[in-house]
Structures are given as C-alpha cells and as structure tokens.
Amino acid sequence: MSKNLKAQLKKVGKSQTDLAKELNLPEMTVSNWVKAKTYPRIDKIQLMADYFGIKRSDLTEDKPENLYDFNSLTVKVPILGTIACGEPILVAENFEGYRYESADTLPQGETYYLKAKGDSMEPTIPNGSSVLIRMQNDVENGEIAAILLNGDTEATLKRVKKQGDVVILMPDNPVYEPIIVSEKNPARIIGKAIRYTVDL
C-alpha cells in the first residue's frame, strides 16, 4: 500500500501534504499511510483511488515494477502472405495474422505487411523480412513498390524507374535483370514499400 501510494503521488506530481489538503485528511494520517505505519480504511482507499483515477486494487495489491504502460493507440496491421524479391511468384493473399504498430509510426492510408521472399532487393530489403506496404496505385520515380504482373497473377517488389513513357522495374541486386513494362508485359502497382521489419 505504502509503495503504491508513493508511486501514485509521484506519477501525478503531488506531495503527501497536497493529498491531505485536497482530500481534507489529517496530514499525520496520510504520513502514517505513506510510511506504512498504519493502513487506511476501505472508504479512505476508495477516496484516494477516485482522486488518482485508478482502481482500489492499484493501491492495495503488489504491482510488478517492470511493466510499462501499453500505448492504447496501437493499430493491427494485417500480414497478407508472400511477395517475391526475385522471380515473380504467384499471388498468395493468405492471411497470416497481424503485426501491432503504434499509430503515430504508421503513414496515412491503408497499410498491410507482405513477407519478402528472395534476394533481388538486397541489400535494401533482406530475404524473409516483413515489408510494410501502403496501398496506392502509383509511386514516385525511384521508389520501391509492390507490383502485380501477368494479369495480376504474380507479385513482386521492385524499384520503379520511369524514363519518359517507359516504366522499368529494377532490382537492387545487380545479379537480377530489370523488367520492362509493356503491353505484352503489363504491370500494376498496388502499394508503396514504406519500411521492413526483421524478426530475430
């Protein structure tokens, strides 16, 4: 009780004198609670809980000290299967779960994760990493995009280079050949790669 009371006072930037005055309690009584000399009655515990905006158990129960407040402004970002960093692979939008992200670290718009498979975008995007994609149908010259090929049946991650009316899908790994977009080899951008995450 004493430890929790001191922690709550510190959290709100108040002293035990402030607490006593604002709750109209004898200062000596509050001092004894803080020093663990006496234990408050249930009605006084409720009074303090209401003052701090917490539950009674937050004052009376032993709390682990290594817990941190979880940012309530978190967003569930879906993981939607695999995308190639190499030869284009068949689209597999199989739902694989979620990654939880802080809302203030995400770009505006709808986002999702794709698993990168292959090494054509190394060293920029490692094989096996989770790539955050923002849904959009175009990107700036030189940006990395998630792209559908061959009648939307295959997907790949490539850097988009625009030279006049010609669009070239460039790998970052020089071992791979670029893909030139044409009427016979159409492509459709489905999102911009924002960043990647690698799980150890």
Image (cartoon, rainbow, N blue to C red):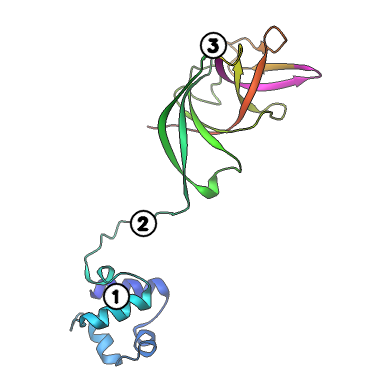
Question: Split into 4 quadrants, where in the image is the N terminus?
Answer: bottom left
Residue 153 at x, y = what percent? 55, 14
Distance from Cα at disc 3 to Cα at disc 2: 44 Å
Q: What residue type is labelled 1?
A: Leu
Residue 123 drawn at (x, y percent)? 54, 23
Label located before the other in sequence (3 or 2): 2
Helix, strand or loop for disc 2: loop
Q: Mark 3 is on which residue type? A: Glu
Q: Label 2 belongs to which residue?
A: 68
Residue position for label 3: 87
Q: Is residue 133 left or right of residue 82?
A: right
Who comes first in sequence, dot 2 or dot 1?
1
Q: Which residue is painted at 56% across and 18% down in the image?
A: 156
Write down the region rendered in magenta: 154-166
Which is nearer the N-term, disc 1 or disc 3? 1
Q: Which residue is drawn at 28% across and 60% down?
A: 65
> Which disc number belongs to residue 195?
none
Q: Which of 98 and 69 is in front in this view?
A: 98
- Residue 10 image point, x, y percent: 37, 73
- Relative to 175, residue 72 above or below: below
Q: Amino acid under label 2?
A: Tyr
Q: Element type at marker 1?
A: helix
- Spatial separation of the CA atoms under disc 2 and disc 1: 18 Å
Label 2: few (<14), some (14–19) or many (≥20) C-alpha neighbours in 10 Å: few
Give the answer, above or below, for where 140 lies relative to 73: above
What secondary structure prevails in the magenta region?
A: strand
